[in-house]
Amino acid sequence: MGATVQLSVIVPTYNEAPNVEELVRRVTKAIEGIDAEIVFVDDSTDDTPDVVRRVAASAAIPIRLIHREARTGGLGGAVLAGFAAAGSDACLVIDGDLQHPPETIPALYERFARGDVDVVIASRYAGGGTSHGLADRTRVLVSKTSTALTRSMFPIKLRDVSDPMTGFFLIDRRSVDQAILRPRGFKILLEILARRSMRVAEVPFDFAGRHAGESKASIRQGLHFLSQLTALRFGKMSLFAVIGGVGAIANVAIVWGLTQVGVGYIIAAIIAAEATIIGNFLLQERFVFHDMRESASAWWLRFAKSFSFNNAEALVRIPVIALMVESGHFSAVVATAITLVVAFIVRFVFHSLVVYAP
Ligand code: GDD
Ligand code: MN
């Protein structure tokens, strides 16, 4: 689809009737000079669609309404439907309740127009931004804690992102791979940022109070968020574990095969260990860290880091097992199991933080 406008302003709405007119007025004023449209993606049960149609009739810029019956994917699903319908690749997402001041749009657009990033994020937590519109101290605490938790779980992808939970951003929709996204609930930006490496810039903004109506945030949205975090993080980790498990089985099989043809046990064990380390690296490159390769160092450097780490780990693990057994607190089996689990976690963290560091 060819671009019909320079900018598509996507507004997800769920029962925002009293806010539509004021939002359109302020957006229209703010984007003067930019060739833009507004796309409402509406799941309302109130008269929001009627208000949108009425306001659209006398608006100075094109306004379109997508009304969904099924409310698929909630707010996140609405945003993706907006991307699909937008007349421009430049898609700006903004809440319908004026907590995101439309007056910030030109700053986002200017930054985006430089053309060197995939997404410009309006941040409450970047220098100069505020979150004073969060209703009460509990929400401030919830917001800050979940932001810190999220950033610590994605130290690389969210390194330059102070506000991954914001719903106010301008993105090039071509950088979004819809097929790998699992929108559930409110945090669609997090879903986008956590799934693949993006080039990111931030612009601070003041998160305001609601213009009218009620927030749709709920305990249920909170639970959606936690399940989203788990799926995003442990998806990679479980794949990493499966490949590690396959490697362990291959390791045993190689030792068996080599000793069958007369190779000495020590030599067979070394060959098997090195072959599995290399095989694991290739499989993890291909299946686990494929989305992080591009921004990481050259492949031979990744291989060197992974290979030396795994060899060092194998060497260190044997004396550690011996020490544990000698301490008298662990049997050999328990000691081996514990070191394997610890080694697995350390190995995963090392690969995501060091081997595939951008
Ligand atoms: N289409 C659609 N479908 N829109 C929805 C739905 C839905 O199921 N649920 C909420 N919305 C719309 C609302 O109408 C509003 O325009 C916007 O999404 C944000 O919803 P609010 O009810 O205002 O939630 P909030 O203020 O708690 O959340 C906002 O702040 C968070 C940061 O604290 C949102 O911007 C979040 O995206 C943001 O993370
Ligand atoms: Mn709101």
Image (spheres, grey):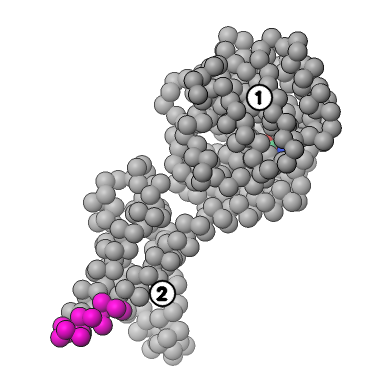
**Residue 164 at x, y = what percent?**
57, 40
Residue ID at (46%, 43%): 196
Residue ID at (48%, 63%): 238
* Residue 4 drawn in magenta: no
Whether residue 32 sits left or right of residue 213 in the image: it is left
- Asked which quadrant contains residue 116, the reply is top left
Q: Are marks 1 and 2 in contact (CB under 8 Å)?
A: no
Whether residue 339 sits left or right of residue 82 in the image: it is left
Q: Quarter holding the C terminus?
A: top left
Sequence order check, earlier mark of 1 and 2: 1
Under mark 2, the amino acid is Leu
**Residue 155 at x, y = what percent?**
48, 48
Give the total number of marks visible in the rendering. 2
Mark number for residue 57?
A: none
Instruction: Mark 1 vs mark 2: give the one in front.
Output: 1
Residue sitting nearer the eye, 299 or 78 = 78
Provide the secondary structure element on which disc 1 rests. Answer: strand
Residue sitting nearer the eye, 159 or 112 = 112
Whether residue 202 sits left or right of residue 103 in the image: it is left
**Which secondary structure class fits the magenta region best?**
helix
Image height of 97 relative to 152, above or below: above
**Residue 129 at x, y = what percent?**
62, 30
Does residue 122 appear in this view? no
Residue ID at (51%, 57%): 235
Which region of the structure is painted magenta? 252-264
In three-dimensional space, the C-alpha distance between marks 1 and 2, rounded to whole angstroms, equals: 52 Å
Mark number for residue 340?
A: 2
Under mark 1, the amino acid is Val
Q: Few, some or many C-alpha atoms within 10 Å of disc 1 (few <14, some 14-19, many ≥20)?
A: many
Q: Label 1 belongs to which residue?
A: 39
